[in-house]
Image (spheres, grey):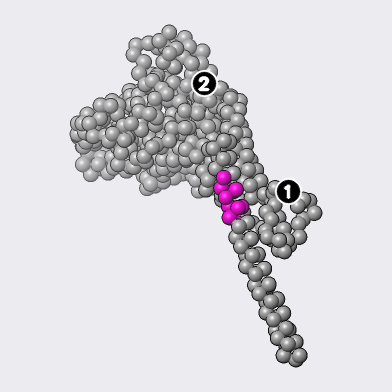
């Protein structure tokens, strides 16, 4: 009995152990079948959805589904019926293991949401492009031209900027040295005589300036991509002030040690030698350049494809005369050149007569504004192209911003000078800053001609430059008349008049300036 009961009890325990082991095996198999079923349905649903609804890579949809754990419960959920096809039954005795279709639903929802977002984004972009003003649509080709391959400083168009920089350096060096030599020649008949003061007139060399800059702008209309136009042209223009600075330092030394005739011999010989380099290194456009790379040539041609850079003999003079953007540039150039030439020609006189500086002993002090002006040109060009390349501002906004900086701040400094004349150092700093900051217009009104009419850039610069030269002739004469009556009051009135003219030119340019190609400057309009 005891053995039987013991045996029966042992058999019952063994049977319960085998039953538990079987249930565990079946439950594991059920879970494996459920996972396989979920994977098969998910894969099938995903491929069917991708083929029907949206061409989205499978990895992108898969990455959007967070890993989820579907628990296996022994009792069906409340909202699941026993015969529901969305549940998978395992063998009896183990209960029902409901397998919701959550992954498929999530997959379908994520895919539909992704497609819906893409369609809405495309629709929004199209609406934005259609709702933009006409001026912004015209500026779009300028801002959208990105170089396919970055061209470095050794490229052909940067080489042209360097050649033009040296050429303008030579031109202004000849211009200033001629002024110094004339002063030394007329002050004394002795060839080694030199007073040590800078010339107070900028008239010599006006004819030289009248032909150089229009030719330079005609070249840049064919060589300068829109997103590099400011830096290239300002690097070239910086040669003007650096050449002036160099001539002021060297020409006086030559006059004192060798005599004024050697100023003509040395500077004239260097200028003639550079002419040969000019004819060897400069070409009309990228298509005729023998050493330009194919990638750079393609980049420049594509960047300038929206504009035509040749006009032949046709000039829409009537349309030019009616163009407010052109008048805005012309008036702004007149007012800016008035202030610039006033400072350039009268600053030595003011420092000598009012501040009592000895310019012969402080030659570096009188030359600092030229160094600052040259560095300001380069900095303004780099900043302007940075704003255009990053699409921070449009072309018109960039031109107006730098014109405002180059015209407003010098006007403020000039107004402040008469009230702080007791402090000579502060006055010199303000005048130097005025001549330095006025170089910001190099990235504004000075190159706006190419923005509004690249086909006529050289001709338009000739027009605006004529008004600027007239201002450079009138300004020193008017200041001479003002200070001849009363020294202190005359200088104060001279500064106030220059500041007022600058403010008027700035307001007019901000109101009517533009950064888009004008209708009369387009090729199809010119042909008609």
Q: Is residue 43 magenta?
A: yes
- Quadrant hosting residue 35: bottom right
List the single residue furthest toward the right.
78
Count residues near mark 1 (Cα–Cα under 10 Å), then give few for <14, some for 14-19, many for 20+.
Answer: few
Residue furthest top as drawn = 528
Looking at the image, residue 495 lies above or below residue 307: below
Q: Residue 431 location, x and y as percent?
A: 49, 40
Query: Can you see residue 191?
Result: no
Query: What stretch of residues is rendered in magenta?
Result: 35-44
Residue occupied by mark 2: 325
The one of 401 and 213 positioned closer to us in this rendering: 401
Quadrant in which the C terminus appears: top left
| Residue at horizontal 62 percent and vertical 67 percent from the top | 25
Q: Establish if 483 lies above or below 24.
A: above
Q: Is residue 452 left or right of residue 21?
A: left
Q: Residue at position x 71%, y 61% from top?
A: 92
- Which numbered disc, 2 or 1, marks the residue that appears first in the sequence? 1
- Name the residue carrying label 1: 84
Q: Main secondary structure of the magenta part?
A: helix
Q: Which mark is residue 11?
A: none
Residue 75 visible somewhere in the drawing: yes
Q: Looking at the image, which residue is at 70% across and 84% down?
A: 10
The nearer-to-camera label among 2 and 1 is 1
């Amino acid at each position: 009995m005891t053995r039987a009961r013991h045996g029966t009890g042992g058999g019952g325990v063994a049977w319960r152990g085998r039953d538990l082991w079987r249930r565990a095996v079946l439950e594991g198999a059920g879970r494996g079948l459920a996972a396989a079923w979920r994977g098969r349905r998910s894969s099938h649903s995903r491929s069917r959805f991708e083929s029907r609804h949206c061409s989205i890579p499978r990895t992108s949809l898969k990455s959007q589904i967070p890993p989820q754990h579907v628990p296996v419960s022994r009792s069906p959920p409340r909202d699941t019926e026993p015969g529901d096809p969305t549940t998978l039954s395992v063998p009896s005795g183990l209960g029902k293991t409901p397998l919701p279709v959550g992954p498929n639903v999530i997959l379908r929802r994520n895919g539909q949401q992704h497609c819906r977002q893409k369609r809405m984004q495309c629709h929004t972009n199209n609406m934005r492009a259609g709702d933009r003003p006409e001026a912004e649509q015209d500026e779009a080709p300028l801002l959208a031209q990105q170089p396919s391959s970055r061209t470095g400083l050794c490229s052909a168009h940067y080489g042209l900027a360097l050649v033009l920089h040296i050429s303008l350096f030579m031109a202004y060096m000849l211009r200033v040295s001629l002024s110094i030599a004339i002063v030394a020649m007329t002050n004394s008949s002795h060839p080694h005589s030199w007073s040590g003061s800078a010339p107070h007139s900028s008239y010599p060399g006006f004819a030289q300036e009248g032909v150089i800059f229009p030719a330079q702008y005609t070249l840049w209309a064919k060589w300068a991509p829109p997103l590099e136009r400011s830096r290239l042209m300002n690097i070239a223009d910086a040669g003007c002030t650096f050449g002036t600075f160099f001539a002021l330092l060297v020409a006086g030394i030559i006059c004192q040690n060798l005599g004024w005739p050697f100023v003509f011999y040395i500077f004239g010989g260097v200028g003639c030698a550079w002419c040969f380099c000019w004819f060897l290194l400069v070409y009309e456009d990228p298509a005729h350049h023998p050493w330009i790379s194919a990638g750079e040539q393609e980049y420049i041609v594509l960047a300038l494809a929206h504009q035509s850079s040749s006009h032949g003999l046709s000039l829409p003079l009537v349309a030019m005369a009616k163009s407010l953007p052109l008048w805005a540039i012309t008036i702004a150039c007149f007012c800016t050149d008035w202030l610039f030439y006033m400072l350039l020609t009268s600053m030595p006189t003011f420092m000598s007569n009012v501040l009592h500086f000895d310019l012969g002993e402080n030659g570096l002090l009188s030359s600092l504004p030229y160094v600052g002006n040259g560095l300001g040109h380069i900095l303004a060009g780099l900043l302007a192209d940075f704003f255009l390349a990053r699409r921070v501002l449009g072309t018109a906004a960039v031109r107006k911003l730098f014109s405002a900086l180059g015209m407003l701040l010098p006007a403020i400094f000039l107004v402040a000078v008469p009230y702080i004349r007791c402090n000579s150092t502060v006055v010199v700093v303000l005048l130097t800053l005025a001549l330095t900051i006025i170089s910001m217009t190099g990235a504004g009104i000075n190159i706006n001609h190419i923005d509004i009419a690249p086909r006529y850039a050289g001709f338009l610069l000739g027009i605006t430059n004529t008004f600027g030269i007239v201002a450079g002739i009138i300004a020193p004469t008017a200041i001479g008349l003002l200070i001849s009556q009363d020294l202190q009051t005359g200088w104060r009135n001279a500064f106030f008049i220059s500041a007022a003219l600058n403010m008027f030119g700035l307001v007019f340019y901000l109101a009517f300036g533009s950064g888009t190609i004008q209708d009369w400057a387009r090729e199809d309009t010119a042909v008609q």
